[in-house]
Amino acid sequence: METLYARLKEPFGLTDWVLQKPDLCFVTVAREQLRPLLLHLRDLEGFTHLVLLTAVDWIEEDRFQLTYLLHDRAKARDIGVRLMLPREDASMDSIHELWPTAATYQRELREMFGIDFPGSPRVNEDFILEGWADLPPYRRDFDTLQYAHEAYAERAGRETRDPARHMKEQLYPDGGQDD
Amino acid sequence: MTEYSNRSQYPQARADGSLDIDLTSGKYLKLWQGPNHPGITGNMSVELTVCGDEVVEGKTHVGYLHRGFEKLMERRTFIQCFPIVCRICVPEPDFNEYCYAAAVEELAGIEVPEKADWIRTLILEMGRINSYLMYLGGQAGAFGLGVIGQWTTYARDLMLDRFEELTGARIYHMFIMPGGVRDDLPEGFDQRMEETLQEIESTLQDVYDTMFRNAVFKKRAVGLGYVDPAWVDEYGITGPVARGAGVAKDVRRDQPYLVYDRLDFEPVIATESDTYARADVRRRDLLMSVDLIRQILARMPRQGEVMATLPNVLHWKIPRGETYVRGECSRGEYGYYLVTDGSGYPRRVNVRGPSYTHAMTLLEKLIVNVNISNVAGLMVSLHTYPPEIER
Amino acid sequence: MKDELEKRLDRRPNDHPQRTALKDIPVREELLPRTVKTPDGQEIRIDPLQDYYCQAGPTVQTPAYTRIIEDLFNWARAESLWILGFGTGCGAIEMRPLMTPRFDAYRYGIQWRPTPRQANLLVISGYLSVKTLKRAIRAYEQMQNPKYVVGLGSCTINGGMYWDSYNTIKCLDEYMPVDLYITGCMPRPEALLQGFDDLKKLIRAGKAEGANRYAENFDWYKTNQKRVIRDWDMPDYSW
């Protein structure tokens, strides 16, 4: 994995290399280098299997992280390619011609995070949700509990306790120390 | 294959490769299979466009079981996530527990006692047997052999008894948790497990005689849903579907996790790559799991802890990091992508179920030119469970 | 449970907190009125929502003219519970053992049917996402009277595990007339058998009046249903 990184670092401008496990590493790449990098990994380095494509919402830093996880069957190793996108009007180039399965992932990201992938097949069709008109639900600023309270009728009598506070009251009825 | 491909010249392809389907022309019909349909794998639906009794286009629709697990986990502490992860996949929940626990342990740097690894492997193999037994019943049922489902469900019930004895629950076990497993094996478990395994083996022999040597089953399953080995990487095919196409792809051997490097086995493969071959791969894989359970019970250490000491789980914070943990479940590669940000809650969890690729792009490709009556059999042969597509 | 339900039925639909600031969801294209050309060249105007379905609402089914005949009917109904084979959630996995020799629900006159037309018991097997709720309502409305609904699992009662999920309903009897709940996550086959037995007792006593309640409070149920199903693109009553 180290030699792979050393080889690809310069030509593709890779940064933030993390060797998570002996057979799994993560790198960050700039947007314009993503497609050449994926093509290189797929065609020349043997990372032929797209394991998953997903997003992480770093709302504090105002950006989305896209993760493309590729698997090399012959050498049994994985590489996770990270890509940072601004959160405003997020949009990314589609990779559905490289892997047909990517179209499904991109449809899900479009629906759940609101990241657009122009040109991806059926990307604007409903995938999981139906008739959804609120914020894309996997964004961090979407509050699922508040939405559930407002949208659905609830049966009275349900209690919810914070486990840490509840355990403290159970174990130390007379107060105890604050943490 | 040839049997299904001599349809008339409709529909014709447009210049850009898409199909020219004019629903008002009277040649085509839209037909929805599911969600309320006996020949559908779980609560999902396929929107078929048919010409005569052959499918010219199929679109998978999922989302009927969406509960937003990935969102719910973001607002639960690491230990609170553990009872909900198993609900992602009903017939084989243990992989969710294992992958989630392993990802958390990896990021938190927790060492799991060796004995817990053995018990985890045992649980996963037991779950695999359950899942395959259910599949065999479904596959036979899709081709009209209802009695196979009665037998395999009976055998599965016996295995559920062993689960109940070990974990206290039939379906959702919540047994593998971050740090190890909840409990040790009960007394006399080996003996009762051996009896169960013998019963399952004898059921499988019956299934082999009545299903795999049945002329009707052969006639309908051979040649249906041919998967080209070249598609394996392109379409992200894993598990028995890939092994049925002659690609020996098995995470248990390629990237051994838990104690699989200490067990003797070889991935089961077949080369015909049709529905019959995939059913046969699963049947032989099931027998291999029976053998693996015997090996585990013979070789596992009987002394020692089953649970590592965890920090106070109510205030458990895990440093920033990300990882991906995979395992070979009965349908293919199951994986968890976990991102933490130093707080007491996961930042992002992504569940990669094998059905995600199989039931969407691959099914939509295979379903073209298939007779309507074989659509159910084709779907079952990919062994998809919709909850892991939509979570 | 009965008092609570009556209290809720009394409540005006508008008392319910309603979510504001929703964008209008356009009707799907194939449901818009349009002109089509038949194969023989004729042009006809169709309005799918009006033409394809029956709009008449359900009616209350009155008991037979004498008590003893009604008792006979109820006995017959109780002894043939035909379940619609629609696995709406994870509880469906425990239905499979019920069909097989070990638990064998068939000996109690319970069997599974593939189509709503032949079934008289709809088992909501667990959490209902909004997308499935839409299908479940249609399946229920297509069933013939007398018909019953059983809610299976904690998540149908008060949300269960998914109490904070944005996509599952929390209280099934707001949207469908539930006759009986079976608790558990998930209920064991024995619990299901016990539940079906209790349902039989209710039917025999003439207390399983869910379908009539649905007909009587049709507007209330429809208002509740339309509140969660944002893209309501079907007629109000679709049998």
Image (cartoon, coloured by chain):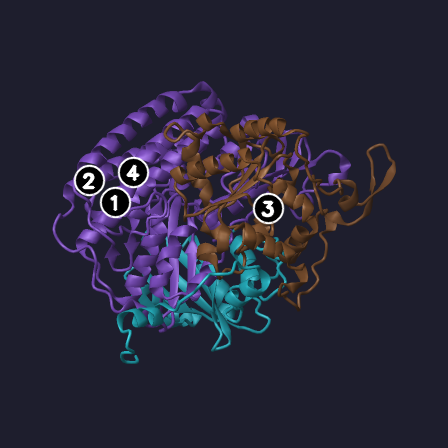
Chain colours: A cyan, B purple, C brown
Q: Is residue B299 left or right of residue A87?
A: left
The Cα–Cα distance between marks 4 and 3, rounded to whole angstroms, is: 35 Å
The Cα–Cα distance between marks 3 and 2, rounded to whole angstroms, is: 46 Å
**Residue lying at 34% horizontally and 35% vertically, measured from the top left:** B157
Q: Residues within 10 Å of mark 1 (few under 14, many from 20)?
A: many
**Residue lying at 36% horizontally and 21% vertically, measured from the top left:** B209
- Which of the two discs, 2 and 1, labels the residue nearer the N terminus? 1
The Cα–Cα distance between marks 2 and 1, rounded to whole angstroms, is: 8 Å
Mark 1 lies on residue: B166
Secondary structure of the residue carrying tag 4 is helix
> Which residue is nearer to you in this view: B68 or C184?
C184
Q: Which mark is residue B189?
A: 2
Q: Nearer the viewer, mark 4 or mark 3?
A: 3
Q: Residues within 10 Å of mark 2 (few under 14, many from 20)?
A: few
Q: Which mark is residue C177?
A: 3
Determine if residue B301 is in view.
Answer: yes
Q: Quadrant of the C terminus of chain A?
A: bottom left
Secondary structure of the residue carrying tag 1 is helix
Q: Is residue B132 above or below residue C134?
A: above
